[in-house]
Every structure is written in structure tokens, then in C-alpha cells.
Amino acid sequence: MKVNFVDLKKQYENIKKEITEAINYTINNTSFILGKEVEEFEKNFAKFCGKEYAIGVASGTDALKLVIKSLDIKDGEVITTSNTFIATALAITDNNLKPVFVDINPDTYNIDVNKIEDKISKNTKAIIVVHLYGQPADMDKIIEIADKHNLKIIEDCCQAHGAEYRGKRVPITDIGCFSFYPCKNLGAYGDGGMIVTNDKELNKKLKAMRNYGSEIKYYHDFIGFNSRLDSIQAGILNVKLKYLEKWNNQRIKNAKLYDYLLKDIVETPKIDKNVKSVYHLYVIKCKKRDELQKFLTENEISIGIHYPIPIHIQKAYSYLSYKEGDLPETEKVAKEILSLPMYPELTEDEIRYICDKIKEFYKK
């Protein structure tokens, strides 16, 4: 049996008629840039997140980058995690700020809140909290620390569309950034991103910032960017948003089956009691990881590693002078984790096949 890591074609086949109608609507109306579809999706996604405003941009990376710029965070340090996609750090360095990496909680893989204050200095300006793999971080403690040290909080929700912390959807604080990269829980058919907030003035500023610093065409109040969510992508996302909660629940169901079948075989995800994870990824911790990866690949099971090289020891960030051993839990996890196929359309037979092969490997 061949099992894909993600199968976007399966999902498309289920909603093909609605997607075609949405695309044709945009083409027939030739409203390709900041059309009605963008405005409608912004309204719908803000409501989904429990926020007043949403600003569509070109990618999740741009969402983070523009938020930092809009908050006028300058000449300082931003705390985040090294166990995430490099885009989180790029948003910091693209704003001429210094990323300061904190080790992870080895159970949840999110930032270890008990180690944050050790990294705070007089130059610390903000914390970017990553809700990794679809599981929200410990926001109560992070908010307490941020308030104590007068730090801004930006929530990187790029893997957590619909995830909940204490019954509330992320972002928990005032600013959250999302990615609509195709494989996300809510994915476009290309790049796309969103910022959500309750701040009316920030909403106004970001909508001008994404559009060359302009509220009125050819009148530019400040130096902005060209970072806009395409109307075609917004139309597609409007269709898919209606199904997101259903799809997330199917991911949770799939995760529970994985948990049951892999119990006592590998270390399955540990989910904090205060959160609802939406399982953007299903990540196991296992012995002989590289050998298992090879075995599963040979049996036509596509898997991934998120992430094999932590950001702090990437060549791109060597100038920060981190070395191996600085973030021991992050580095240990990077050598042991494996991401199994996870998407709503994954069948029970496919999950059982994957788990049978994992059991077979460890019985050899």
C-alpha cells in the first residue's frame, strides 16, 4: 500500500465543484488584487478566530514580518524557539532584530516557559510564541512573563488554524499570524497569509503597509510592502474555511487511532490538558529514527522530519555564535522525531498499515 504524507488531491476532489465556482467568479469579475473575495475572507476568518479584524497578506512569513514592522520594534532582541520552521526567525532578522532562542519542553516540543526569563535582557522587546504542530503553547505563563517585563507578544499560529487554549481559539492575545501554505490545515492553492487582531489602528496600518504604504492609490504615507493575498486564493480559502472544523475533528480522530495503535511502541504526542491540538502534524519520538524512516520509505509510506536541524545551528545563523549543546532538548528531539502521514482524508486502513509496519520494524 502506498501512503502519501499529505494528499491534497483527495481533498480537492471532495470540494471540486465549489472551488471551480469560486475561481471562475474571480476570473469573470477580473478582481484579481484585493477584490471582494479578500474582504469577505478577511471578515470570515476574523470571526472564526474570535477577532475583530483580519489582514490578508502574501504568506505566513510576511504576516510575521509585517507585524514586527508595524509594532515599531527596533534595535533589540526577540525571544522565540529554535524548533520551528526558519520563517519565524527570518521575520525577526529581516527587521534587523536579533533572535534569542529558548529551549523546548521535551513533552510538547513548544517553548519551555520556565526557561524564558533566563533569556530576557534589557534589550528584549518581544516574544514570538509558536504553536507548534497544531498544539498551543502555555499562554498563561507567557502572558504573565510578558506583562512582568513589558514585552509584546506575537503568536505564530501558522500550524494552528482552529487550535484552542482553555476553550478559546488562537491567538489568545491580540495578534496572531497564519500561513495558508497548501499543506496547512487551511491551505490555499499557492502562498497566502493572514494577520488577525482586535486593534483598529493596527488593522488600518497593516492594510496600508501591505499595499505599498498606501490607503489611497498613489498616496503613500510611509514606506510599505507589496504583500497582498490574491483574490483567487481568498475565494478558495472561503470555500475551505466552511470545512475546517470538520477536517480538524477528523485529524483528531486519526491521531487518537495512531495513539491507540502505537501505544508502547513509540512515544506518541503528549497533549497538554488545557489545549485542543488540531494536529497539523502527527510527530512521534522513536529509537533508531533514521533506520525507521528508511524502512517506512521502502514500504511506500511517505514521512517527514520537522525539523532535522534546529535554527540556532543552521549555517544561516552561525553569526549568532550558538553551538551544539546550547539548547540540549531541542537538539535531542531533532534526532528522534518523525512525522507520520496526517490529513483529514487519511483512511483507517492506511493508518493501520503504517502502524503495522512500525511494529514490524521494531520486532526485527
Image (cartoon, helix red, strand yellow):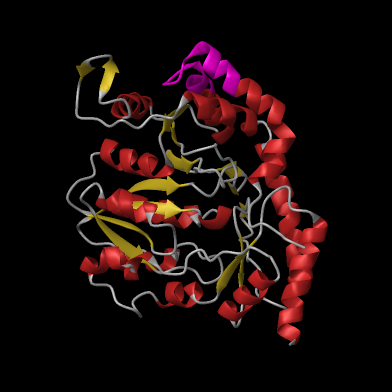
The residue depicted at 58 percent of the width and 29 percent of the height is: 236
Assign the N terminus to one quadrant of the image: bottom right
Region rendered in magenta = 23-40
Q: Quadrant of residue 68?
A: top left
Residue 246 seen by the camera: yes
Assign the C terminus to one quadrant of the image: bottom right
Q: Does the magenta stretch include residue 19?
A: no
Could you say where residue 10 lies in the image, as x and y percent from the top left?
Answer: 71, 43
Q: Is residue 37 magenta?
A: yes
The residue depicted at 45 percent of the width and 57 percent of the height is: 141
Farthest residue, direction left: 75
Farthest residue, direction right: 349
Q: In which quarter of the image is residue 294?
A: bottom right
The residue depicted at 53 percent of the width and 18 percent of the height is: 26
The residue depicted at 72 percent of the width and 40 percent of the height is: 246
Vertical placement of residue 161 versus 267, above or below:
above
Q: Is the magenta stretch mostly helix, strand or loop?
A: helix
Query: From the viewer's perspective, is 63 left or right of 179?
Result: left
Could you say where residue 241 lies in the image, as x and y percent from the top left?
Answer: 62, 33
Vertical placement of residue 145 versus 330, above or below:
above
